[in-house]
Every structure is written in C-alpha cells, then in structure tokens.
Amino acid sequence: MTLQDLTVLICDDSMFARKKLSMAIANMGVGQIFEAADGAEAIEKYDECNPDVVFMDIIMPKVTGIDALKAIVAKHPDAKVVMASSVGTQGHLKDALKAGAADFLQKPITDEDAKKILENAAKGVL
C-alpha cells in the first residue's frame, strides 16, 4: 500500500488544527482525507469512510477522544487510531493505550510525526 492508497480521518475540535494537519497530509499525497469536529462526529465518519488511520484529539466537547476511541474499537477492533493531546499527557497516554490506541502523539502534531505514522500504516506496521 502507498500513501496515495490511504484514507485518513482527522478528528479535532480545533478547525485550525484539523486544516493544518489535513493540508500537510494532502501534500504527502494521501488519497482521501476526512474531518470530524468532535468524538460523536468521528464515530459517524469512521463508519462512513472506514479510514486506514485516524488522528484523534483527546480533549473535545460532546464525546471525548477516549470515548470515541472506545466506541470505534468496539465496532472495528482493527482500527488504527492515533491519539493526540497537549495537556496532561501521561494520564491520557495510559488511558488511550488501554482503550486500544495504535499510537500517541504530543500536540502540536508535526508533519514529520504524521508522515512517520502514515508510512507505517502504509507498510502495515502501525
């Protein structure tokens, strides 16, 4: 699989963070990119687009990233969800990994971090 073959879902309540990551990933050549503004929307979008990789913020309104992760993994055990947070990362890291996260990134997510995640997903090693 190549980066062009990947489908990615970006979930963050910050429109700026979503657009910045979306543009960076598009510049890497990723084929399809979808966005969600909160955890509830992420669960719906996951079912619609069945992404290869999800980048999900932990702290969001309505449904938190951890709760969305749990809901997605319950329905799709092979989901590759990469959690991101800038606050209280140590506690969130444990919660995210216990809930089934494939990886965890410190915000802001750098282009290099995103590219490494996507390359690993394309190789099937995420």
Image (cartoon, grey):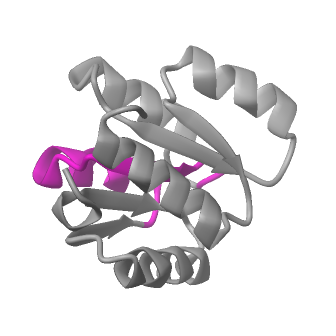
Q: Percent x, y for residue 122?
A: 30, 48
Q: Is residue 124 left or right of residue 48?
A: right
Q: Report the residue at 58% width, 55% height from top.
A: 61
Q: Nearer the viewer, residue 120 or 95?
A: 120
Q: Is residue 118 left or right of residue 34?
A: right
Q: Position of residue 92 (x, y in %)?
A: 74, 32
The quadrant in which residue 108 appears is bottom right
Name the residue furthest left.
48
Total number of numbered discs in the rendering: 0
**Would you place residue 49 above or below residue 81 in this image?**
below
Question: Looking at the image, can residue 30 be seen?
Answer: yes
Residue 120 image position (x, y, % from top left) = 42, 44
Q: Image height check: is 41 above or below 21?
A: above
Instruction: Pick whichever, 72 or 77, lies toward us.
Output: 77
Q: Is residue 55 magenta?
A: yes
Residue interval drawn in magenta: 37-60
User: Does residue 103 belong to the magenta stretch?
Assistant: no
Q: Is residue 64 visible?
A: no
Q: Is residue 88 left or right of residue 118?
A: right
The residue sitting at the top extreme is 98
In percent of the image, x 15 and y 54: which residue is there?
A: 49
Horizontal and vertical percent for residue 69? 45, 33
Q: Which residue occupies 49% across, 50% down?
A: 117
Residue at 45% x, 59% y is 11
| Image quarter hosting the C terminus | top left
* Quadrant of the rendered image containing residue 30: bottom left
